[in-house]
Amino acid sequence: MSFKIAIHHGPDCSLRMGFAFICALLLAQIILTTSAKAERVTVFAAASMTNAIDELAKKFQRQGRGTVLTSYASSAALAKQIVNGAPADLFISANTAWMDYAEKNDSIAPGERHDFLSNRLVLVAPVDTALFDGFTLNPGADLGKALGSGKISVGDPDHVPAGIYGRQALEHLGLWKDISRKTIRMPNARSALALAERGEAAAAIVYATDAAISKKVRVIAVFPAESHAPIIYSVAMVAGRKSAAAKAFMDFLRTEEAGRVFSRHGFIPLTRTNRQ
C-alpha cells in the first residue's frame, strides 16, 4: 500500500504564509527596538553642565532612545583622558581650546564637532557677607581691599576654562596682578563655587549657570563679555566611538527642545546669528 501527500496552495495557505510574514516583521522590529533602547552613550562633559545634561539625559532615556552615562570634570582633565583612550562616546568642552587639543590628537571624529552654547562669567560671594557692599567691578577697582584677608576661589587658570576666562577678565580690568596671590586654584568651576558656598573663600569666579543653582552665594558682578574670550561650549563625537545612539544624543542636544532646557539653566544657545 502506498500513500501520497497532497500539498494544497489554496487561499488558507496564502493567509497562513502572510500571517507568518507579518509576525516575522513584528519580531524583527521588537528586536531592533530593544537593541536601540539598550544602547549606551557615555558622555564626558564639563562640570558646569552637570544639572542641564543630567536633565536632558533623563528626557532622552524616557523617550526610549538609549541610556546615557555621564562623567563630569574640568574640560582639560576630560580632554586628556579621551586622548589617552578613555571610553567616551561624546565630549562636551567648556572652551574650544581643549576641544582643539583633542582634535589635534586625532581623538575627535572628523566632521562631528559643533559649537552650541555660551555662558557668562560672574563674581560671587557668600550670601551673608558684607565684604562687597558698595563694590563695583570696573577697571582699577580695588578687589583686593574688598576681599580683605579673604581668598578668591577660581578654576586653575593654567588649564581650567572658567579660570582661564577669569584671569583674562581680571587682566583686562587691571586687577590680576593685585589679587593673583589671593587666589585658591581649584580643579573646576563647581569646586570653586563650593568653597564660596562653605565660606572657605570670600568670593569665587564662576559661570552664571553655576551661581544660578546655588542658594548659598549671590552674584556681586557680571564680568563684561569683552573682558575675556567668548565662552563657547563644543560637543563632538569621539573618534572610533560613533554609534546611532551617540549621534542621536548629540543631535538632541542641539534641538530647540534641548535649547529651552539649557536656557532655563542659564546657558545661551548659539544660533546662526549669535554664533562666534
Image (cartoon, rainbow, N blue to C red):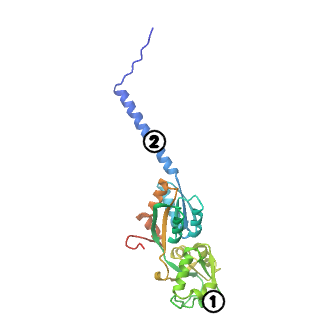
Q: Is residue 249 above or below residue 94?
A: above
Query: In the rendering, at what x and y percent does residue 23 appear?
Result: 43, 37
The amino acid type of the residue labelled 1 equals Gly
Q: Is residue 104 above or below residue 167?
A: above
The quarter of the picture where residue 111 lies is bottom left
| Front residue (pair 240, 261) | 240
Secondary structure state at the residue bearing disc 1: loop
**Residue underneath mark 1:** 148
Q: Earlier in the sequence, mark 2 or mark 1?
A: 2
Label 2: how many residues lie within 10 Å, few (<14), some (14-19) or many (20+)?
few
Quadrant assignment for the C terminus: bottom left
The amino acid type of the residue labelled 2 equals Ala
Q: Residue at x 50, y 51 (%)?
A: 37
**Residue underneath mark 2:** 28
Query: In the rendering, at what x and y percent does residue 260 appear?
Result: 43, 67
Quadrant assignment for the N terminus: top left
Query: In the rendering, at what x and y percent does residue 42 appear?
Result: 55, 58
The quarter of the picture where residue 162 lies is bottom right
Apparent side of residue 171 relative to residue 117 in the rendered image (left or right): right
| Front residue (pair 120, 211) | 120
Query: In the rendering, at what x and y percent does residue 26 appear?
Result: 43, 41
Label 1: how many residues lie within 10 Å, few (<14), some (14-19) or many (20+)?
few
Q: Is residue 116 above or below residue 135?
A: above
Secondary structure state at the residue bearing disc 2: helix
Q: Residue at x 54, y 84 (%)?
A: 170
